[in-house]
Image: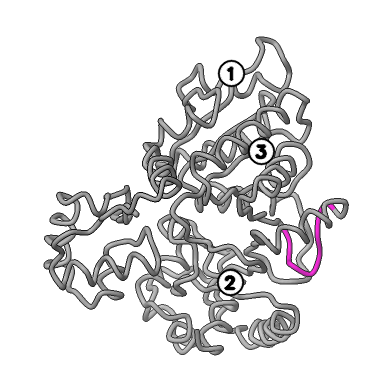
Amino acid sequence: MPEHEILSTMVLSRMSYFSLAGMLELYNRVGSAKTILEHRRDIRALLPDASPRLVEAFQKAGELWRRAEDEIRYDQANGIEPITMNDARYPQRLRECPDAPLILFYKGTADLNPTRVISIIGTRHSTAYGQDLIRRFCQDLRMLCPQTLVVSGLAYGVDICAHREALANNLPTVGVLAHGLDDLYPPRHRQTANEMLLNGGLLTEYMTQTNADKVNFVRRNRIVAGMADATILVESGTKGGGLITCGIARDYNRDVFAFPGAVGAPYSEGCNNLIRDNGAALITSAEDFVKAMGWETDQQLRQAQQQGIERQLFPELTPEEQTIVNALRQCNDQQINLLSVKSGIAIGPLTALLFSLEMKGVVKPYSGGTYHLLA
C-alpha cells in the first residue's frame, strides 16, 4: 500500500470521530483517501451534506497530516502494520460492517482472514465454571476446527482466559485493544500479549498515544464482533460489555451463542436471559457449536488427512473456474466485488461461474455476498 494512501487514511480516520458512517460512505464512494484529501478545500463537491464541523476539520488537515507522519515513523520502527480498508490484509468480515474502521494497526503473525474466526467474550469476573467451559471448548475446538482464529479483548476474566487457552491449544488468537500499540492495558497481561505476537497478534483502530478511555472499550466491541463469523458469550451478568458485543454481532447478522449457567448465578444471568429471549443459541460444547455453524467438514477433512486419504476437490474445472479457485486460495471468504478484481472477471460472468462452482460443491455463499472455498 503506498505510504501516501496510508497517511491519508490516518488523517480521515482522525476526522471520522465527527461522523464515522459519513466518512465511511465517502471513502467507499471515492475509493481512495488520497483523492478525498485532494478535495479538502471543496469537500462538499464529494459530500454535499458534510456538516460544518467536518468541513472545518478538513481545513485543518495539515495538523493531522503531521500527526500521521509521526505515527507511521513509530509504526515502522516498532513492527506495527497500518492496514487500510482497501488493503487485502484488512479483515474481510469487518469490512462488511457499516461502521468499520478506516484503518487498523496490527502487530502479530496471524492471518486476519482465515477460514474460521470466532469471538469468545464475557464478564471480567469469570468463575471457575466459566474458565472450565473455555478450557474444554478450546481443547475440543483444536480437534474439530484446528485453524480457527480466536478473537477477544485481552481484558480480565473471560477474555484473557480465552486467549491463554487458545495459545495452550495452538489456536491463533488476536486481542483487540482500546488504545494504541505503544501501551498495554491491563499491564499484567503483558506476558500473554507477547506470546500472542508469536501465534496471533494485537489489533487496534487507535494510533499510539491514545489512552484506554472508557468510550474506547465500547467502540472496540464492534471490531470484536465484526471480524468474527460467530460470537460466543461464556459468562455475563445482567449488564455488561459482553451483552453489548452480542447485540452488535446480531446487528451485523452474525451468529451469537451462549453457554447456560445455574439459575440465579450472578455471572450466568446475562447468558440465561439472552438464551431465553432468543438473543443467542444455547451451546454446551464445541461440538454443539461446530454443528450449529455447519463446520463439520473441517473434522472430516482432518480425519481424511490423518488417514492419508487424498481428497480430489476440484474435478473438471474450466479455466475461468480455476482462476476463481486460485483467487480464493490466496485469500478465502471474499466478497464478489473484490473477487472480481482479484480474478479479472466481470461481475456478470463471475456470478454465473460462482453458481456453477456452488453446484459442484467447490464454494459456499455466505451472507453479504461473500464466497468461501470449501477446502
Locate residue 222 relative to residue 348 in the image: left or right.
right
Residue 311 lies, in percent from the top left, at 30, 52
**Of callouts 2 and 1, which one flags the residue occurring earlier in the amino acid sequence?**
2
Quickly name the residue at label 3: 241
Q: Which residues are magenta?
A: 179-186
Identified at 73% across, 40% down, the residue is 161
Quickly name the residue at label 1: 272
Q: Mark 3 touching mark 2, by CB under 8 A?
A: no
**Of callouts 3 and 2, which one flags the residue occurring earlier in the amino acid sequence?**
2
* Disc 2 versus disc 1: nearer the observer: 1
Q: Secondary structure at mark 1?
A: helix
Quickly name the residue at label 2: 15
Locate residue 299 relative to residue 105 in the image: left or right.
left
Q: Quadrant of residue 318?
A: bottom left
Q: Secondary structure at mark 2?
A: helix
Taking depth in this image into account, of 126 and 322 the one nearest to the observer is 322
Residue 131 lies, in percent from the top left, at 73, 31
Mark-to-mark CA distance, 3 and 2: 26 Å
* Disc 3 versus disc 2: nearer the observer: 3
Prevalent SS, magenta region: loop
Disc on res. 36: none
Q: Please tell me whether residue 156 is drawn above or below residue 354 in the rendered image.
A: above
